[in-house]
Amino acid sequence: MSAADTVNLSSVLLSGGQVALVLAGAPLLVGLMRQVRARLDGREGAGIWQPWRDLRKLLRKTRIAPEGTGPAFRVAPLLAVACTAMAAAVVPLISTRTGLGPGADLIAVVALLTLAAAALALAGLDTGTAFGGMGASREMTITALAEPTILMAVFALGTRVGSTNLPQIVTAGVQHGGRLASPASLLAAFALGVVVLAETGRLPVDNPATHLELTMVHEAMVLEYAGPDLALVELGAAMRLTVLLGLWASLFAPWGIATATGPAALALGLGVLVGKLALLAVLLAAGEVFMAKLRLFRVPELLAGSFLLSVLAVTASFFLT
Amino acid sequence: MNLVGSALAVAAGSAGGAALAAVVLPTRLRVVAVGALNALMGAAGALAGGAALAGESFAAHLPVLLPLAGVYVGVDALSGLFMAVAGAVVLAAGVYQIGYARHAGGGRGAQALWPLFAFSLLLVPAAASVSTLLVAWELMAASSLLLVVSGHRGGGDSVRSAGVWYAVMTHLGLVAILTGLVWLAAAAHSETFAGITASAPGLSPLVRGGVFVLVLIGFGSKAGVVPLHAWLPRAHPEAPSHVSALMSAAMVNLGVYGLVRVGLDLLGGGARWWWLTVLILGALMAVYGILQAAVTSDLKRLLAYSTVENLGLVLLGVGAAGAFHDSGHDELAALALAAALLHTVTHAAFKTLLFLSAGSVLHATGTRDLDELGGLRTRMPVTSGLFALGALGAAALPGGAGFPSEWLLLQSLIHGLAVPGITVVVVLPIAVGAVALSAGLAVATFVKAVGTGFLAKPRTQAAEQAHEAPVSMLVGMGMAALVCAGLALLPGAAGAALRRVVAGSLPGSGAAVTGGVAGRLSALGSTLSPLWVVAGTLALVLVLRGLLRMVARAPSRAAVLWDCGAPPPTARMQYTATSFAEPLQRVFDEVLAPESDLDVTPHAESAYLVERVAYSRAVPDRIEHRLYNPVIHTVRRAGMTARALANGSVHRYLGYGFTAVVLLLVVLAAAQ
Amino acid sequence: MNGDAELLDLAAGAFLLAAVGVLWRRDLTAQTSLLAVQGFALAAIAVILGADQAHPELYAVAAGVGLLRGAVLPALMRRAVAARATDRETRPLMNVGASLLSAAVLVLLAYAVSQPLVRLLGTASARALPMGLAVALIGLLILVTRRKALSQITGFLLLDNGITAIAFLAAAGVPLLVELGVSFDLLLAVLVLRVLTTRMRALFGDTDLDDLRELHD
C-alpha cells in the first residue's frame, strides 16, 4: 500500500471535482464527437453544446411511466448514472490522490460500470416489450464477452506494479514513461481500446446514432425512456464514454496527471485531461466515419481478437521484461 | 467439555429430537416442532463452528458408538469454518421449512430424514478418523438421496431419473474415497487423522499420488467437478427447495473440505501436478457451469449449474494455493486459500438465499420454468427483492456477496505471476481468463433470471396468480439475506477467522505467512472497501433523485408502451429466458451443441402462407451425452446379456450360490 | 544495446501481430496486406540484428527478405485475389473466435517450450524467439483450419516466415546462400500453387479445398 492512504478532506473534494467535471463535460464530449463527424460528412453540425440543449429540453418534459413498468425501470437510470459517477470519483483522471485512493481498484471500477449496464438491462427487460428484451440480451452478451479482455489487460498492467490499485498503476506510469512503449503496454492498450468501444456502444460494435431495430443494441434497451429519465440515460451513456476514455488515457498516456496536490499541478492535470479527452474524441469520431457496424455475431470475433491481444500482453509483460 | 463440544451435543440432541418429533407428533404440531428443532440444531452447529473459528478446539473419542474403531471427533478451525457454514444454512432452511413443508417435503419420512441429513453435514467436518468420516459421509449421501427421491408429489420420471443418477454417482464417489482413505490409513498404519498426519511425509510418492487421485475423484464428484458433475444439475432441482439449499450451499462444500483436509492437511501438500490438475478442473468447471446456467431456462437448474461454477472458482483457488505452496510461496498460497474459503462462505450465503427464493416461487406458481414466469415483483415483492439481492451476489457485482471473494481470488492469481516456473506462468493467464469469462457470463445469467422471472409481465396464468410466501419462509430467506449483506459490505470482518483457518490448514505455515495474510485480508477491508463503494453509490442515487425532483417538476403521467403502431403488445411478445440467452447460445454454439428443431406447417391453400411454426430447442449437457451415454449403453447391453443367467428358477439361483462357495473353497485350498 | 533490444521486441511484436491479424481478418485482401507488413517486420528484425551484431551481410539478407516477402509474394497474392470472384474466407473449418482462442493457447505453448533455449542462449534476440515459433504454429493452424487454397498459401507463408525468424533469432542469421535458396523455393511454390488455383478455378469454378476430396473418388 502506498504511503499514508488517508481519506482526507482535500482528496474527497478532488473526487467531487472529478465527478462534477465528468458530469458537466460528458455531454460536451459527445457534442464534440458529433460535430467532428458532421464536418467530415460535409454537414454543418449542431455545435458541441447541442447535447446539453437536448438534456435541458428533456429535463423540462413530463415524466412518463410506461404501463406495467415497476421500480426497477424507474431506479435504473439513477443507478446507472450513480455507478458511473462513482467510477469517475475513483479513477485518477486529474490527480492520483482521489478520495477513495486506496479503494480505487481497477477491478472495482470495471465492476461498477458492469453494474450500471446490468441495471439498464434489467430496466429493458422490465418493460416487457420485444425491443427492451432484445437490447438487454445483446448488451449483456457483449458485456459478458468483453469481461475476459478487461481482466486480462488488468492482469498485464497489474503484474508490473504488483497491484490492481489504479493510483499505483498510474503513478508508476508517470514515473517510468519508457515502460509505456513496451510491447506489453501497447498490446494492452489496443485490447482495452477495443473493449472501450464495445462497452460504450460505439462503432463497429453498436451505432449510437441508429434507430433501426435490427441494428440497435443500447438504444433498443432504453427505447421506453422519455423525458427526464431519458435525459439521465443519455447523460449516463455520455459519462460512461468519458470515464472509459479517461481511464484509457490515464493508463496508457498518464503524462500530466497530478501526483501532488498543489493548485498548479491540479490545474495542469485538468488542462491535460481536457486536451487528451478532446484528442481521443476527435480521433474516435474521425475513425467512425470510415467504419461500418459489424454484424452482431461478428462482434464475438472482434472481442476474441482483443482477448488474444490481452493474452499476448500478459505473456509479453512476463517474458519480455 | 468446552463450548464446541456442548454446542455439538445440543445439535445432536435436537437432530434426534426433530427426527423423533417428525415420526410421532400429529401433523399440525409436527411441522412447527420439527422446524423449530431444526433451527435449533442449525444455531448450535453454527455456534460450534463459530467457537472453533474463534480459536477453540475440541477432540473426543467415543468408543461405544462404532464397533472396532469407535468414533473420533475433532474440531479445529478448518472444520469450524465448514461447520459454521453448514449450521447457518441449516438454521435458515430450518425456519423456512416451517412454511414450505406444507407445499413439499412435508411427509413424515422426509421430515424425519431432513434433520439426519442436516446433522450429517455438521458431522462430516467434525470427523477425526477415516472410519468416522466414511460413516458420516455415507449417512449424508444416503439421507440426501432419500430426500431427493421424496421430491414433489407426483414428480414422475424426472425425479426418478435424478434419483438414479445421484445414487450411482454418489456411491461411485464413495467407493473412490473409501479406497483412497483406507489405502492411506493402511500405509500410514493409523486410522486417526492425527496419526496419518504424523506419518504421511514418510509415504512413497506413489501412495501419496494414488491416494490423492482417488480422493480427488471422490470428493470432486461431490463438489461437482466436470465431468463428474452430471448428477448435480439433475438432483439439486428435483429435490424440495429446502433440501436443495442444503445440498447446494452446504453439501457440495464438503467436497472442497475433503480435498483441503486430505490434500493439504493430512498429506501435507504434494507434487505440483496435483494442484495444477485441481486448478485446471476448477477453471473448466467455472466456465462450463456458468455457460450451461446461461442457456437454461429452468430456474433451479440454473442455480445448480451456478453451483458448479462457484465450486469451480473455489477449487481454482485451492489449486492455486497448493501450487504456490509447492513452490515455496507460502504467503501467496495462504492468500489463494483464504480467497477460496471466503468464496465458499459467500457462495453458501447467496446460494441458500437463491434456492430458498426459488422454492418460494415454486411454492407460489408451481413452475420453475423462467419462460412461464414473469411479473412476480408485484405479486411477491419481498421474495423478488430477496432473490435480486442473492442474484447480485451471484453476479459478483459491487454490493453483492460474491464480489469481495472473487476480487480476492483474482488478486491472488495476479500476484501469482511472481512465482517462477513455466507451468504456473502458462496456467495462470488461462485461469484468470476463466474467472473473468465466468464472471461476465454470471452477470448475463442472473440478469436473465431476475429480468425474465421476476420483472416484466406474467407470461402464464400460474405466474399471474402467484402470491407471497408465508412469514416463516420469508424469515428463513431474510436470515440468509442478512448474512449476504454482511459479507458483501464488511468482508474484512471474516479476516481473523480466515487467518486462523489458513494457518491451521496450510502445512508448515509460520507466523510470517499468517502475518502476510493478515495484511492482505485487512486490505480487503481498506483497499477494496466495498462498504464505501456501496455507500457512495447509494448516496449518489439519493442526491441525483433529489436533483431530478428539483429540476423536473412536471408531474408524472402513465403512457402505453411503444407498439410499432400495431395492436398493444401482449405478454406473449416479451423476450423470454430462452430468447434472452439465444445470442450467447449462438456464440458458444460449438461448445454447447444445442439441438433445435424448426417445423413450419404451410397453409392448406398455398405453400407460401405459413399456418403454424413450431420451434423447439434443447441444450443437453454435452459432456453427459458424450461421456456417459456410451458407458450407460455398454452397461445396459451387458445387463441384457446377463439376463439369460436369471431365468426365474430358484434351483438355478441356489446353484449359483453353491457353485460360488465351492469355487471359493477350491481357490482357498489351492492358495495354501 | 538496450535500445536495440527494445526495437527488436517491437519488430518481433509487429511480426506476431501481423500473424494474429491474418487469423483475425476473413478478407483475403487484408490478409495479403498483413503478410506484406509481416515481411517488412522480418526484414526489420534482420536489420536490427545486423546492426547489433555487426554482421553487414545481414543487411543484404534483409534487403532480399524485404523485397521478396514484403513486396513480391504479396503482389503475386494480390493478383491472385483480384482474379477471383469471392475474396473472403467464408466458412473456415473452425470459427474465427475459436481459432483466435486457440492461437492464444498456441502462443502460451510456444513461450513454454522455448524457455530452455532462451535461457541457454541468454541473448536479447533469443528472448524474441518464442514469437517466431508462435507465428509458425499459427501458420500451421491456418493450414489446418482454412478451406480456400489462397488461405492455405497464406498459412504456408506464415509458417515459413516463422521458421525464418527463428533462424535469424537463434543463430543470428542464416547463411546468405541458404536464405536465398529457401526464398527461391518459396517463390516457386507460390507460383506453382498460383497456377494450380487458376487451373482449379477453371475446372471447378472455386478453390475450396474440400472439393478436391471428390477427385479421390
Image: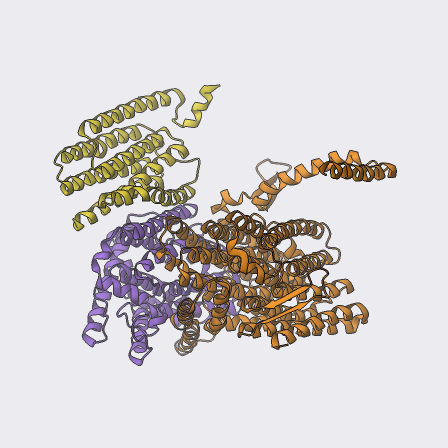
Chain colours: A purple, B orange, C yellow
Q: Nearer the viewer, residue C5 or B273?
A: B273
Q: Is residue B63 above or below residue C21?
A: below
Q: Quadrant of the C terminus of chain B?
A: top right
Q: Is residue A320 left or right of residue B43?
A: left
B423 vs B59, nearest the viewer? B59
Q: Tag count in the figure?
A: 0
On the image, the x and y values in percent for residue B59 come to 61, 70
Which residue is more in the foreground, A189 or B448?
A189
Residue B282 visible, this angle: yes
* Image location (x, y in percent) of residue B29: 78, 74
Quadrant that contains the N terminus of chain B: bottom right
Residue nearest the observer in this picture, A120 or C164: C164
Q: Which corner quadrant of the image does residue B17 belong to?
A: bottom right
Residue A180, percent from left and from top: 24, 56
The residue lying furthest to the front in this view is B672
Relative to C155, residue A152 above or below: below
Give the side of residue B532 with respect to residue B366, left or right.
left
Q: Position of residue B554 (x, y in %)?
A: 44, 76
Q: Quadrant of residue B511?
A: bottom left
Q: Residue furthest bottom?
A: A9
| Residue B457 shows up from this direction | no
Q: Residue at 32% across / 39% down in the picture? A: C133
